Amino acid sequence: MFSACALRVSPIPHLCDVIVGAKSLFVRRDFVSRVRFAEVGSRRGRSWVGVRAMGSVPADFSKPRKVVKKVLSQAQPEGDGATVRRSIGRPELKQLDPFLLLDYFEASGPAGFPDHPHRGFETVTYMLQGSFTHEDFAGHKGILEAGDVQWMTAGRGIVHSEMPSPVGVQRGLQLWVNLAGKDKMIEPNYQELKAKDIPRIEKDGVEVVIIAGESFGVKSPVYTRTPTMYLDFYLQPGASLHQAIPEGWNAFTFVLKGSMVFGKEDAPPIGPSHTVVLSDGDGLSAWNKGTEPAQFVLVGGKPLNEPVAQYGPFVMNTQAQLMEAVRDYQYGKNGFERAHSWRSEAKAQSTP
Ligand code: FJE
Ligand code: FE
Protein backbone atom coordinates (compact mmCIF):
# COMPACT_ATOMS: atom_id res chain seq x y z
CA MET A 1 0.00 0.00 0.00
CA PHE A 2 2.89 2.35 0.82
CA SER A 3 4.80 3.51 -2.24
CA ALA A 4 8.20 5.09 -2.67
CA CYS A 5 8.08 8.87 -2.77
CA ALA A 6 10.22 11.60 -4.23
CA LEU A 7 11.60 14.40 -2.13
CA ARG A 8 12.23 17.96 -3.18
CA VAL A 9 13.80 20.56 -0.94
CA SER A 10 11.20 23.29 -0.77
CA PRO A 11 11.99 26.98 -1.10
CA ILE A 12 10.34 27.41 2.31
CA PRO A 13 13.05 27.10 4.97
CA HIS A 14 12.82 23.98 7.17
CA LEU A 15 10.28 22.31 4.87
CA CYS A 16 10.51 19.58 2.29
CA ASP A 17 8.13 18.73 -0.51
CA VAL A 18 7.09 15.07 -0.48
CA ILE A 19 5.80 14.11 -3.92
CA VAL A 20 3.68 11.01 -4.44
CA GLY A 21 2.30 10.59 -7.90
CA ALA A 22 0.61 13.85 -8.78
CA LYS A 23 0.15 14.89 -5.16
CA SER A 24 2.54 16.55 -2.78
CA LEU A 25 2.69 17.85 0.74
CA PHE A 26 5.09 19.85 2.85
CA VAL A 27 6.67 18.32 5.93
CA ARG A 28 9.43 19.46 8.27
CA ARG A 29 12.90 18.78 6.88
CA ASP A 30 14.11 17.00 10.01
CA PHE A 31 11.15 14.65 9.70
CA VAL A 32 11.72 14.05 6.02
CA SER A 33 15.19 12.85 6.87
CA ARG A 34 13.56 9.67 8.04
CA VAL A 35 10.79 9.36 5.44
CA ARG A 36 11.02 6.35 3.19
CA PHE A 37 7.54 5.73 1.91
CA ALA A 38 4.41 7.74 1.39
CA GLU A 39 0.88 6.79 0.64
CA VAL A 40 -1.91 8.49 -1.27
CA GLY A 41 -5.52 7.68 -0.74
CA SER A 42 -8.97 9.08 -0.59
CA ARG A 43 -11.75 8.78 1.91
CA ARG A 44 -15.24 10.24 1.65
CA GLY A 45 -14.20 12.12 -1.45
CA ARG A 46 -11.17 13.77 0.21
CA SER A 47 -7.69 12.80 -0.86
CA TRP A 48 -4.83 12.49 1.62
CA VAL A 49 -1.14 11.76 1.69
CA GLY A 50 0.48 9.69 4.41
CA VAL A 51 4.18 9.23 5.08
CA ARG A 52 5.99 6.53 6.97
CA ALA A 53 9.11 7.38 8.93
CA MET A 54 12.13 5.07 8.89
CA GLY A 55 15.26 5.23 11.01
CA SER A 56 17.95 4.39 8.50
CA VAL A 57 17.79 6.99 5.78
CA PRO A 58 20.58 9.61 5.77
CA ALA A 59 19.48 12.88 7.27
CA ASP A 60 18.92 15.88 5.13
CA PHE A 61 21.36 18.13 6.96
CA SER A 62 22.01 21.01 4.63
CA LYS A 63 25.66 21.02 5.82
CA PRO A 64 26.53 17.54 7.09
CA ARG A 65 29.69 17.37 9.20
CA LYS A 66 32.50 15.15 7.92
CA VAL A 67 35.62 13.63 9.41
CA VAL A 68 38.56 16.03 9.06
CA LYS A 69 41.03 14.32 11.41
CA LYS A 70 41.39 10.89 12.97
CA VAL A 71 43.83 10.23 15.82
CA LEU A 72 44.49 7.06 17.85
CA SER A 73 45.11 7.37 21.61
CA GLN A 74 47.59 4.92 23.14
CA ALA A 75 47.49 4.21 26.87
CA GLN A 76 49.87 6.38 28.91
CA PRO A 77 50.58 6.62 32.67
CA GLU A 78 49.03 9.61 34.47
CA GLY A 79 48.41 10.68 38.05
CA ASP A 80 49.46 8.13 40.65
CA GLY A 81 49.41 4.69 39.01
CA ALA A 82 46.44 5.38 36.70
CA THR A 83 46.37 4.93 32.93
CA VAL A 84 44.73 7.32 30.50
CA ARG A 85 44.07 7.36 26.81
CA ARG A 86 44.31 11.07 26.00
CA SER A 87 42.10 12.35 23.22
CA ILE A 88 41.92 16.16 23.20
CA GLY A 89 45.08 17.52 24.86
CA ARG A 90 47.54 15.19 23.12
CA PRO A 91 50.15 16.84 20.86
CA GLU A 92 48.15 16.25 17.63
CA LEU A 93 44.94 17.52 19.26
CA LYS A 94 46.32 20.26 21.45
CA GLN A 95 43.13 22.25 21.77
CA LEU A 96 39.73 22.15 20.22
CA ASP A 97 38.31 25.39 21.61
CA PRO A 98 36.61 25.35 24.18
CA PHE A 99 37.97 21.88 25.05
CA LEU A 100 41.36 21.47 26.70
CA LEU A 101 41.46 17.75 27.45
CA LEU A 102 39.55 14.48 27.22
CA ASP A 103 41.03 11.52 29.07
CA TYR A 104 39.59 8.02 29.06
CA PHE A 105 40.92 6.70 32.37
CA GLU A 106 41.32 3.17 33.61
CA ALA A 107 42.46 2.18 37.09
CA SER A 108 42.57 -1.04 39.05
CA GLY A 109 44.13 -1.39 42.47
CA PRO A 110 45.41 1.62 44.40
CA ALA A 111 45.73 4.38 41.78
CA GLY A 112 44.28 7.80 41.16
CA PHE A 113 44.75 11.53 41.14
CA PRO A 114 45.73 12.67 44.65
CA ASP A 115 45.55 16.28 45.95
CA HIS A 116 46.00 18.77 43.09
CA PRO A 117 44.69 22.26 42.16
CA HIS A 118 42.63 23.67 39.27
CA ARG A 119 41.85 27.23 38.15
CA GLY A 120 40.11 28.77 35.15
CA PHE A 121 38.09 25.89 33.67
CA GLU A 122 35.63 23.04 34.38
CA THR A 123 36.24 19.31 34.77
CA VAL A 124 33.48 16.89 33.77
CA THR A 125 33.89 13.38 35.14
CA TYR A 126 31.66 10.62 33.73
CA MET A 127 31.98 7.17 35.29
CA LEU A 128 31.51 4.22 32.93
CA GLN A 129 32.36 1.39 35.31
CA GLY A 130 33.16 1.05 39.01
CA SER A 131 33.31 3.93 41.47
CA PHE A 132 35.42 6.88 42.39
CA THR A 133 35.77 9.01 45.55
CA HIS A 134 36.40 12.74 45.45
CA GLU A 135 36.96 15.31 48.17
CA ASP A 136 37.98 18.95 48.03
CA PHE A 137 39.58 21.52 50.32
CA ALA A 138 36.19 23.12 51.11
CA GLY A 139 34.84 19.89 52.63
CA HIS A 140 32.86 18.81 49.57
CA LYS A 141 33.06 15.07 49.06
CA GLY A 142 31.22 12.17 47.50
CA ILE A 143 31.29 8.98 45.51
CA LEU A 144 30.66 8.74 41.78
CA GLU A 145 29.26 5.42 40.58
CA ALA A 146 28.81 4.00 37.07
CA GLY A 147 26.68 6.38 35.02
CA ASP A 148 27.09 9.35 37.40
CA VAL A 149 28.41 12.72 36.25
CA GLN A 150 30.25 15.41 38.20
CA TRP A 151 30.37 18.75 36.40
CA MET A 152 32.84 20.77 38.44
CA THR A 153 33.44 24.45 37.78
CA ALA A 154 36.85 25.10 39.31
CA GLY A 155 36.57 28.86 38.71
CA ARG A 156 39.06 30.77 40.89
CA GLY A 157 40.30 27.68 42.61
CA ILE A 158 39.75 24.11 43.74
CA VAL A 159 42.20 21.71 45.36
CA HIS A 160 40.88 18.17 45.34
CA SER A 161 41.61 14.48 45.31
CA GLU A 162 40.06 12.12 42.73
CA MET A 163 40.57 8.49 43.67
CA PRO A 164 38.99 5.56 41.86
CA SER A 165 38.00 2.74 44.23
CA PRO A 166 40.94 0.40 44.88
CA VAL A 167 38.59 -2.60 44.41
CA GLY A 168 37.75 -3.83 40.90
CA VAL A 169 38.15 -1.96 37.64
CA GLN A 170 37.26 1.73 37.30
CA ARG A 171 36.69 3.32 33.90
CA GLY A 172 35.51 6.75 32.95
CA LEU A 173 36.03 9.95 31.02
CA GLN A 174 37.24 13.32 32.17
CA LEU A 175 36.65 16.33 29.94
CA TRP A 176 38.13 19.78 30.59
CA VAL A 177 35.97 22.66 29.32
CA ASN A 178 37.60 26.06 29.24
CA LEU A 179 35.87 29.07 30.82
CA ALA A 180 35.60 32.51 29.21
CA GLY A 181 37.91 35.12 30.72
CA LYS A 182 34.95 36.73 32.47
CA ASP A 183 34.13 33.42 34.23
CA LYS A 184 37.61 32.21 35.17
CA MET A 185 37.55 33.74 38.65
CA ILE A 186 33.98 32.81 39.64
CA GLU A 187 33.25 30.85 42.82
CA PRO A 188 33.73 27.11 42.41
CA ASN A 189 30.55 25.12 41.80
CA TYR A 190 29.44 21.50 41.45
CA GLN A 191 26.61 19.97 39.44
CA GLU A 192 26.34 16.36 40.48
CA LEU A 193 24.01 13.98 38.69
CA LYS A 194 23.26 10.43 39.62
CA ALA A 195 22.78 8.08 36.66
CA LYS A 196 19.00 8.09 37.24
CA ASP A 197 18.89 11.91 36.89
CA ILE A 198 20.52 11.88 33.45
CA PRO A 199 18.09 11.54 30.53
CA ARG A 200 18.52 8.33 28.55
CA ILE A 201 16.53 7.70 25.36
CA GLU A 202 16.28 4.52 23.34
CA LYS A 203 14.92 4.42 19.80
CA ASP A 204 15.43 2.18 16.77
CA GLY A 205 18.59 0.50 18.06
CA VAL A 206 20.12 3.76 19.28
CA GLU A 207 20.50 4.59 22.94
CA VAL A 208 21.77 8.00 24.03
CA VAL A 209 22.74 9.36 27.44
CA ILE A 210 22.27 13.13 27.38
CA ILE A 211 24.99 14.46 29.66
CA ALA A 212 24.76 17.99 28.25
CA GLY A 213 22.72 19.56 25.47
CA GLU A 214 19.84 17.98 23.59
CA SER A 215 19.14 14.79 21.65
CA PHE A 216 15.87 13.23 20.36
CA GLY A 217 14.12 16.36 21.64
CA VAL A 218 15.22 15.76 25.26
CA LYS A 219 17.41 18.22 27.18
CA SER A 220 19.97 17.62 29.92
CA PRO A 221 19.43 19.50 33.19
CA VAL A 222 23.13 20.47 33.29
CA TYR A 223 23.94 24.19 32.99
CA THR A 224 26.89 24.77 30.68
CA ARG A 225 28.45 28.18 31.28
CA THR A 226 30.48 27.59 28.13
CA PRO A 227 27.79 26.28 25.72
CA THR A 228 28.53 22.55 25.42
CA MET A 229 26.92 19.32 24.23
CA TYR A 230 28.03 15.92 25.51
CA LEU A 231 26.25 12.75 24.35
CA ASP A 232 27.07 9.09 24.99
CA PHE A 233 25.70 6.93 22.14
CA TYR A 234 25.18 3.15 21.95
CA LEU A 235 24.27 1.70 18.55
CA GLN A 236 23.17 -1.83 17.77
CA PRO A 237 24.59 -3.36 14.57
CA GLY A 238 22.75 -1.82 11.60
CA ALA A 239 21.54 1.21 13.55
CA SER A 240 22.18 4.81 12.51
CA LEU A 241 21.58 8.27 13.86
CA HIS A 242 21.35 11.88 12.82
CA GLN A 243 22.31 14.36 15.47
CA ALA A 244 22.02 18.13 15.10
CA ILE A 245 25.08 20.13 16.18
CA PRO A 246 24.93 23.94 16.18
CA GLU A 247 26.81 25.49 13.27
CA GLY A 248 30.05 27.17 14.24
CA TRP A 249 30.64 24.87 17.23
CA ASN A 250 33.71 22.68 17.38
CA ALA A 251 32.84 19.01 17.72
CA PHE A 252 34.56 15.64 17.96
CA THR A 253 33.76 12.01 18.71
CA PHE A 254 35.72 9.43 20.69
CA VAL A 255 34.92 5.76 20.02
CA LEU A 256 34.77 3.53 23.11
CA LYS A 257 33.51 0.20 21.67
CA GLY A 258 32.92 -1.44 18.32
CA SER A 259 33.32 0.57 15.14
CA MET A 260 31.47 3.56 13.74
CA VAL A 261 31.09 5.21 10.34
CA PHE A 262 30.86 9.00 10.58
CA GLY A 263 29.83 11.72 8.12
CA LYS A 264 29.01 9.71 5.00
CA GLU A 265 27.84 6.16 4.64
CA ASP A 266 30.80 4.95 2.58
CA ALA A 267 33.46 6.41 4.90
CA PRO A 268 35.87 3.92 6.52
CA PRO A 269 34.80 2.61 9.95
CA ILE A 270 36.56 4.03 13.01
CA GLY A 271 37.56 1.72 15.86
CA PRO A 272 37.97 2.13 19.64
CA SER A 273 40.27 4.80 21.17
CA HIS A 274 40.10 6.96 18.04
CA THR A 275 39.20 10.63 18.17
CA VAL A 276 37.49 12.07 15.13
CA VAL A 277 37.45 15.84 14.66
CA LEU A 278 34.43 16.98 12.64
CA SER A 279 34.21 19.72 10.03
CA ASP A 280 31.76 22.56 10.59
CA GLY A 281 28.14 21.93 9.64
CA ASP A 282 24.68 21.55 11.11
CA GLY A 283 24.70 17.88 12.09
CA LEU A 284 26.36 14.49 12.19
CA SER A 285 25.15 11.25 10.65
CA ALA A 286 26.67 8.04 12.00
CA TRP A 287 26.22 4.34 11.24
CA ASN A 288 27.15 1.12 12.98
CA LYS A 289 27.97 -1.11 10.03
CA GLY A 290 29.79 -3.65 12.16
CA THR A 291 28.56 -6.86 13.76
CA GLU A 292 29.07 -5.74 17.39
CA PRO A 293 27.29 -3.04 19.39
CA ALA A 294 29.20 0.25 19.24
CA GLN A 295 29.65 3.08 21.74
CA PHE A 296 31.02 6.59 21.21
CA VAL A 297 30.77 10.00 22.81
CA LEU A 298 30.00 13.12 20.82
CA VAL A 299 31.25 16.36 22.35
CA GLY A 300 30.65 19.83 20.92
CA GLY A 301 31.10 23.36 22.18
CA LYS A 302 30.92 26.99 21.17
CA PRO A 303 34.46 28.28 20.69
CA LEU A 304 35.51 31.01 23.12
CA ASN A 305 38.00 32.53 20.63
CA GLU A 306 40.20 33.80 23.44
CA PRO A 307 43.94 33.32 24.01
CA VAL A 308 44.79 30.26 26.13
CA ALA A 309 47.69 30.33 28.59
CA GLN A 310 48.06 26.94 30.29
CA TYR A 311 50.41 25.57 32.89
CA GLY A 312 49.17 22.09 33.87
CA PRO A 313 46.00 22.53 35.95
CA PHE A 314 45.89 26.36 35.61
CA VAL A 315 44.29 27.73 32.44
CA MET A 316 44.10 31.50 31.95
CA ASN A 317 44.17 34.02 29.08
CA THR A 318 47.58 35.62 29.61
CA GLN A 319 51.03 34.68 30.88
CA ALA A 320 50.69 37.28 33.66
CA GLN A 321 47.41 35.71 34.89
CA LEU A 322 49.08 32.31 34.76
CA MET A 323 51.97 33.45 36.97
CA GLU A 324 49.44 35.00 39.34
CA ALA A 325 47.57 31.66 39.51
CA VAL A 326 50.76 29.77 40.40
CA ARG A 327 51.66 32.42 43.00
CA ASP A 328 48.12 32.41 44.48
CA TYR A 329 48.35 28.63 44.86
CA GLN A 330 51.84 28.82 46.40
CA TYR A 331 50.93 31.58 48.85
CA GLY A 332 47.34 30.47 49.52
CA LYS A 333 45.58 33.58 48.15
CA ASN A 334 42.60 34.60 45.96
CA GLY A 335 40.61 31.40 46.35
CA PHE A 336 43.48 29.10 47.40
CA GLU A 337 43.35 30.14 51.09
CA ARG A 338 42.78 26.58 52.27
CA ALA A 339 45.25 24.99 49.90
CA HIS A 340 47.98 24.28 52.43
CA SER A 341 46.14 23.51 55.64
CA TRP A 342 44.21 20.79 53.82
CA ARG A 343 45.12 17.21 53.05
CA SER A 344 42.60 14.73 51.64
CA GLU A 345 41.53 11.81 53.81
CA ALA A 346 42.65 9.54 50.98
CA LYS A 347 46.17 10.94 51.23
CA ALA A 348 46.16 11.03 55.06
CA GLN A 349 45.33 7.31 55.04
CA SER A 350 48.11 6.38 52.65
CA THR A 351 50.84 8.65 54.16
CA PRO A 352 50.73 8.83 57.98
C1 FJE B 1 45.87 16.97 36.38
C2 FJE B 1 48.06 15.42 35.78
C3 FJE B 1 46.83 14.82 36.06
N1 FJE B 1 43.37 13.18 33.67
N2 FJE B 1 41.44 11.92 34.29
C4 FJE B 1 48.22 16.78 35.81
F1 FJE B 1 46.72 13.51 36.05
C5 FJE B 1 45.72 15.60 36.34
C6 FJE B 1 44.40 14.98 36.61
C7 FJE B 1 43.77 14.17 35.59
C8 FJE B 1 42.63 13.37 35.75
C9 FJE B 1 41.79 13.08 36.78
C10 FJE B 1 40.79 12.20 36.53
CL1 FJE B 1 39.71 11.79 37.76
C11 FJE B 1 40.60 11.63 35.28
C12 FJE B 1 42.43 12.77 34.53
C13 FJE B 1 44.20 14.03 34.31
O1 FJE B 1 43.85 15.14 37.69
F2 FJE B 1 44.84 17.71 36.65
C14 FJE B 1 47.11 17.57 36.09
N3 FJE B 1 47.25 18.91 36.09
FE1 FE C 1 41.23 17.27 39.22
Image: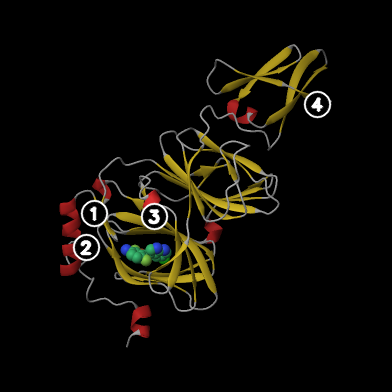
Residue drawn where x is 53% and y is 54% of the image: 198
**Quadrant where the N terminus lies?**
top right
Alpha carbon distance from label 4 to label 1: 60 Å
Q: Nearer the viewer, mark 4 or mark 3?
A: 3
Q: Residue at x 43, y 75 (%)?
A: 111
Q: Which mark is residue 185?
A: 1
Q: Amino acid at mark 3?
A: Arg
User: Looking at the image, do the residues carrying marks 4 and 3 touch, with CB atoms under 8 Å apart?
Assistant: no
In the displayed structure, does residue 22 sit left or right of residue 278? right
Q: Which of marks 1 and 4 precedes in the sequence? A: 4
Q: Residues within 10 Å of mark 2 (few under 14, many from 20)?
A: many
Closest to the observer: 64 or 22? 64
- Going by the image, does 191 lie left or right of 186? right
Of mark 1 and mark 2, the one earlier in the sequence is 1
* Residue situated in front as seen by the camera: 191 or 207: 207
Indicate which disc, 4 or 2, sits on the residue closer to the N terminus: 4
Q: Note whether 136 is above or below 277 in the view shown.
A: below
Q: CA distance from mark 2 to mark 3?
A: 29 Å
Residue type beneath disc 4: Phe
Amino acid type at circle 1 is: Met
Image height check: is 335 above or below 227?
Answer: below
Which of the two labelled residues, at mark 4 and mark 3, occupies the earlier sequence position?
4
Labels 2 and 3: the sequence-earlier one: 3
Q: Which residue lies under the disc numbered 3?
A: 90
Front residue of this view, candidates 53 and 311: 311
Residue placed at 45% from the left, 43% from the top?
251
Can you give x and y, in whole percent of width and height, for residue 113 in the image? 38, 70
Q: CA distance from mark 1 to mark 2?
A: 9 Å
Occupied quadrant, residue 133: bottom left
Name the residue that disc number 2 marks.
335
Question: Is residue 233 in view from this perspective?
Answer: yes
